[in-house]
Image (cartoon, coloured by chain):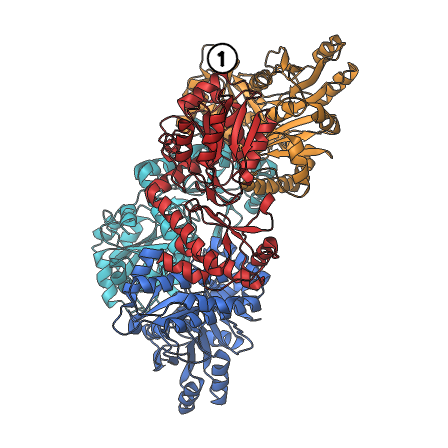
Chain colours: A orange, B red, C blue, D cyan
Amino acid sequence: MEGMKSIFKTEEHVFIYPASGTGAWEAALVNTLSPGDRVLMFETGHFATLWKKLAEKLGLKAEFIEGDWRGGADPERIEAYLAEDKGHEIKAVCVVHNETSTGSVSPIAEVRKAIDRAGHPALFMVDTISGLASLDYQHDEWGVDVTVSGSQKGLMLPPGLSFNAASSKAMAANKTAKLQRSYWDWEDMVGPNKTGYFPYTPGTNLLYGLNEAVDMLHEEGLDNVFARHARHGAATRAAVRKWGLEVLCATQGQESGVLTAVKVPEGHSADAFRATTLEHFDMSLGNGLSKVADKVFRIGHLGDFNDLMLVATLAGVEMGLKQADVPHQAGGVQEAMSLLS
Amino acid sequence: MEGMKSIFKTEEHVFIYPASGTGAWEAALVNTLSPGDRVLMFETGHFATLWKKLAEKLGLKAEFIEGDWRGGADPERIEAYLAEDKGHEIKAVCVVHNETSTGSVSPIAEVRKAIDRAGHPALFMVDTISGLASLDYQHDEWGVDVTVSGSQKGLMLPPGLSFNAASSKAMAANKTAKLQRSYWDWEDMVGPNKTGYFPYTPGTNLLYGLNEAVDMLHEEGLDNVFARHARHGAATRAAVRKWGLEVLCATQGQESGVLTAVKVPEGHSADAFRATTLEHFDMSLGNGLSKVADKVFRIGHLGDFNDLMLVATLAGVEMGLKQADVPHQAGGVQEAMSLLS
Amino acid sequence: MEGMKSIFKTEEHVFIYPASGTGAWEAALVNTLSPGDRVLMFETGHFATLWKKLAEKLGLKAEFIEGDWRGGADPERIEAYLAEDKGHEIKAVCVVHNETSTGSVSPIAEVRKAIDRAGHPALFMVDTISGLASLDYQHDEWGVDVTVSGSQKGLMLPPGLSFNAASSKAMAANKTAKLQRSYWDWEDMVGPNKTGYFPYTPGTNLLYGLNEAVDMLHEEGLDNVFARHARHGAATRAAVRKWGLEVLCATQGQESGVLTAVKVPEGHSADAFRATTLEHFDMSLGNGLSKVADKVFRIGHLGDFNDLMLVATLAGVEMGLKQADVPHQAGGVQEAMSLLS
Amino acid sequence: MEGMKSIFKTEEHVFIYPASGTGAWEAALVNTLSPGDRVLMFETGHFATLWKKLAEKLGLKAEFIEGDWRGGADPERIEAYLAEDKGHEIKAVCVVHNETSTGSVSPIAEVRKAIDRAGHPALFMVDTISGLASLDYQHDEWGVDVTVSGSQKGLMLPPGLSFNAASSKAMAANKTAKLQRSYWDWEDMVGPNKTGYFPYTPGTNLLYGLNEAVDMLHEEGLDNVFARHARHGAATRAAVRKWGLEVLCATQGQESGVLTAVKVPEGHSADAFRATTLEHFDMSLGNGLSKVADKVFRIGHLGDFNDLMLVATLAGVEMGLKQADVPHQAGGVQEAMSLLS
């Protein structure tokens, strides 16, 4: 618990679920909201869309600020939307920090300021399932009310643990929130957690791994971890530009250090390319999801990743492009290397 | 999926959650019931009580047939209770198969017959979290509508996976059930499962382990596995009798082959005895829960357990009783051995 | 290196070979002796006999003080033998500390005194392959010149590492020893070892394990480790007596805490009994070797072994005796337990 | 045993030692030769030199055909040398197949023909410790009498097992060979091996690994394994040429697919470069040994290695050259990639 607080950078509450990240999304909502509540979400990509569907399944009125999947959430549009809500009916603003489907990062601190500028009391919820422990994240400093995360990305563990970090304001909302809940209920967790217990069987084995992961992160230094991922993101984008391909994230400064989604040229299949790369180089790339299915592939550079692993990955992509006859220019790997050494 | 069907002995639906058994309890209820529905439960012990509380948290009207924690569910009392419910307001009968807190086993096939004798249409739900793959269990043959189980007992895995097996009748109830659900929703599972996917990140590592566990069980033969646990239960009870102590389960034929709860003599602390045993023999025994806290200790003999491991366990108990000055007669281990060889 | 010195209790030289214990036997001889040298050995059992054959293969004149395999080496007979050797032609006295084939322990400190009483300059070599880190051993204090050991017994590792500890006197003998040697040569080791290297590829993985094993032993405390094995030896012998069987070691005070060899009654096959025990209880007992083949079985209680593991082992024996119809009295396990609690 | 025969491509004898490769060198000599025997060796590099020293330590007269460390053994010079030995005093010709210190491969089949052309009866011994299971090797077909190998290179295991494959001619020589031997004695092995035993404790854990390694090699297909290493060697040399550096092996057709030794420009320290690469890219390169110390570094591409791992390795070298200010041209990685895709 203390270790996870140091990763979320919070002095407040952390909850650990034996569940996938999707469960922690649900937990964030059911612990703080009531049936019919309006929640504002921002369409950063596939996962933001899934979170919205989940909110709707739970009986919330989820409203989407539409996005083009090529950048993070836009603070100004959020501010404008909230300013319209004079009656403060919107009870939560939900933003995805690192959109795993697009490789774009939302400016969380700026969204907080936008909410404040609008003078709006909504809870601020952030999904950083794939961002935590790879990108800078500051639950307290940035004024987030509920942060959602999971074990299988920056924390370098198998899937199976997920997390909520909750502010005092969120804890207060929990008292009056009327959405049905049991497994996810924070209230049932607080007591047992104080004495080192959980209200039901926890993911014991993964908790041991989590301790070790937190130690590893602090041993390297969180700032060094963040710098490493930023370097890998920049090197990857340099390679993509050299190949003459386009990075899906089109918003300067919001490109992710966790993964890079790359568009294949019109008339080419990203999935055929991915299949070729897997067959020839035993390397599995991420696929494009829903709106960008078959149009993009995703290069992961998260977790326990180093410079040479990145070069190997980019080489797999470059050689795969050649094998699959996707039009491109060679030299991307060499370009990336020039940024790494 | 096919493997788990062979363990549940069902041709119908199986759902696998990346969650603890408690989550699968919740899943069973939210997938089939609506707010305010009456459910009949039987107080076999601590876990039956937890399941009832969970049902209440979810907005169900849970009614308890009280029990003394010294046996399984009583089919006759269930039949009588249902017979009173002329209007068929009770929507589900929920019974714990193997009560982990008491070491008693409910006669599931008999409960089914009792429901039928009462001519009652309620769904029949069974928790066999700690019984599956140790005690005979037949989802289809016994007419169970929803079976709940988990990975960390008879399936010999770490915690982190839990299961629902669902009959066609339960699947039909899912169509009209109004309880709020998302993570647990069967409907969202059915489609992706058909092509080998899940609607969200599954517990991948544990799924590999599950395949192996199912293979191990079939290699030994389920009937041999059941016989082994039955033999270990009988040997343990023989040891307990020889020690002059009392088995918590007082109902002939309902004693568990998974674990044996043992009462310590009046005026003695089961927890002090457990602490002594842990300190001197590096062996951790289960504690008494709620009503029987400090009054019983529990000897586990589940999972990948063999005769010599059982003798070692019983020796730890017998030597612990001596160390902790709990009045008893020596010779329990020897008595158990006479039943094992 | 430092860790192994702390286990041998020596301030002198330690050599680590990527080889079995048999290699370290050979190393002890070829590093210190010349072709045709006389060496005095004591027939404590099968392994002493193998060491003698090895010496003969190497061109040494190995002389045996015959023994009945029912005790350790006899200091008085060694003293008498040496006293006869007025010309000091005997260059080494070789004794097995813990005879793995019989479960007898030679009184090493007493043998040293016997050599001194005889005023004989022979080197004193001791094989404690199976004794080290289970039984008290003091290379320097007891005046041993070359100690031989291995990784796979008290050091709790897989086989693959073996050791020599060498006194200054042994190191001096190395300068003039004429037996052919290369792989085993101490001289080639001394230089590289000083800077953390070896003259050829070492057993790298096992060296990591060795570090951990040494830490584990010191964490428990060597004296506690020795006391634990002594207790297990005594409990095992109590069980054997209760069964009405006979311990092979017939010399009071020389019974091993590492293993206990047990005679089966005349007319019964120890190997048939062992096969039965393996089949019924999945427990593999040691067999009788050469002179005592099929006449004894051996119960191991070495390494990372605790009280309950011992009880399980003894239960396997007692139930195996019953299954195999070997005449015995029940109650051995219970007797052992009375000594353990 | 059968598995190793399929790797050595022999129908004759295979011996497995719990020892390093150096032990198997010793075994080859002591099992077949007598004190004072002349043996002809070829100075392919550091390891050939070590084997010669070992032979001398064992009392053999080892004669060296000097080499410049830039190629494999020269069959013509061997033929000429043997032709001089009218009295057939030379009892063995010893050649290193893959020189781990230089990355050169000796043409074993050609050496066999050269011996035959000279009409010389000497035994033919080959060290393929680092070549086996990476480069084509045919013990029987090539008429080798004793092949020496080890576990930690192409067999993908930790160090700790080493091997001799022996022809009938070598087995016959064993009968009359007078060099002292015990641990290494083939004769003591033959009997126990027939029933699945060893004359002393084998490296049990590694034997399980060996079974798996052999299965993995056959699953990929030995010819595919060899082609993979050949491709990696060629790609590595292309990178080296692009960097403007020189491959140590200067003999066309004898460059190794197992490793590539690379000369650093005059006035630069290979070891300083290696230290820089380790520090910046967490990659450890092989050092230059004896004659070429600090003048070369070695790039390994053996064992379970794939194209992307090779690119990563070459990238580590290229970026390390830049970091360490070693004069070179960029583009080597890109050049290698063009050969891999």
- Residue drawn at (68%, 14%), measured in percent from left and top? A74
Is residue B296 shown left or right of residue A86? left
Q: Is residue D17 above or below residue C264?
A: above
Label 1 chain ID: A
Question: Percent position (x, y) of residue C225?
Answer: 54, 66
Q: Nearer the viewer, residue A72 or B177?
A: B177
Residue at the outermost top position: A84
Q: Position of residue B75 (x, y in %)?
A: 44, 35
Question: Residue D326, image x and y in percent?
Answer: 58, 38
Screen quadrant of the C terminus of chain D: top left
- Amino acid type shown at disc 1: Pro
Q: Is D26 drawn above or below residue D206 in the view shown?
A: below
Residue D132 visible (yes or no)? no
Q: Which residue has dot 1 on it?
A: A265
**Residue at left 53%, top 39%?**
B67
Circle 1 — which element?
loop
